[in-house]
Image: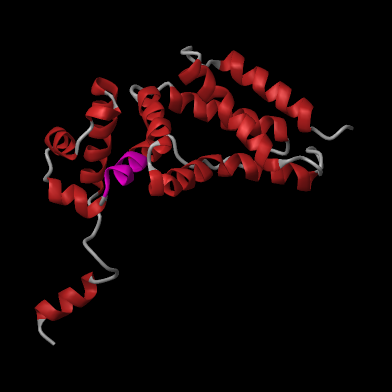
Amino acid sequence: MTNRQSGADMGSKGPGRPRDERMDGAVLSAVVELVAERGMAELTMTAVAARAQVSKPAIYRRWPTKQDLVIAAAESRVGALAVPDLGSFRDELRELLTARLRQYRAPGVDRLLAGVIGAAAEAGDARRAYGAYTSRVTGETRRILERGIARGDVRPDTDVAAAATLVAGSLLFRMLAEQDAPDTGLVDAVVDMVARAVGAQG
């Protein structure tokens, strides 16, 4: 076996090219910046490549469609969370919503999420990809509710899917529909209302 063959074998741990995290970060940041500046309708692969200073083929190798790229950008700013077991559904819900609040306040995130929601409505067959992203984002809320049911501080008859939708929609609706920045007061109100609605009676 030659040295070249040995090196190739050692480097071939999976299909395709190794991911360049720096390039990923530059491209996804470019998407967020461009959407914030120009809106989703003006977002093109050409503009992203120019802003990120990478080639279009490099972008297409990583994200074959514009939908893939937009979802990846959204997930880089508002993605899955992990909340530890704090022994209380109320405390865990506040931890989750406080983390989301920090994400929503980041520059450009409001327009990016508005664009994602609008694009999902027009995506046709690609709607499943947007739905999968939403499922990942709300996954921790469902786990918190299920953990509360198992622990006994959430009612066992709770509709977990409906409650997760209520939690996820509260801050988003304030930010995108009401055009007002969500704050800790809204977080406290949502935590109190949801906890009273689904909390087990002691």
Q: Quadrant of the N terminus?
A: bottom left
Dividing the picture into quadrants, the one containing residue 61 is bottom left
Residue 145, image x and y in percent? 69, 41
At 18% from the left edge and 40% from the top edge, which residue is drawn?
45
Please identify the quarter of the rendering in which residue 24 is found: top left
Number of dots carrying numbers: 0
- Chosen colour scheme: secondary structure
Q: Is residue 156 left or right of residue 52?
A: right
Q: Is residue 112 above or below residue 174?
A: below
Residue 85 shows up from this direction: no
Q: Residue 49, position in %: x, y?
A: 15, 39
Q: Residue furthest bottom?
A: 1
On screen, residue 169 versus residue 192, left or right, reads left
Q: Position of residue 152 (x, y in %)?
A: 82, 42
The reply to whether residue 140 is visible in this rendering is yes
Query: Looking at the image, which residue is at 53% across and 15% down?
Result: 183
- Could you tell me which residue is drawn at 53 percent across and 21 percent down? 173
Q: Assign the magenta stretch its main secondary structure.
A: helix
Q: Magenta segment range?
A: 65-72
User: Image quadrant for the C terminus?
Assistant: top right
Q: Is residue 194 left or right of residue 102?
A: right
- The structure residue drawn at horizontal position 23% and vertical position 59%, both measured from the top left corner, is 18
Residue 55 sits above or below residue 187 on the image: below
Residue 107 colored in magenta in the image: no
Left or right position of 2 against 102: left
* Residue placed most toward the observer, 13 or 1: 13
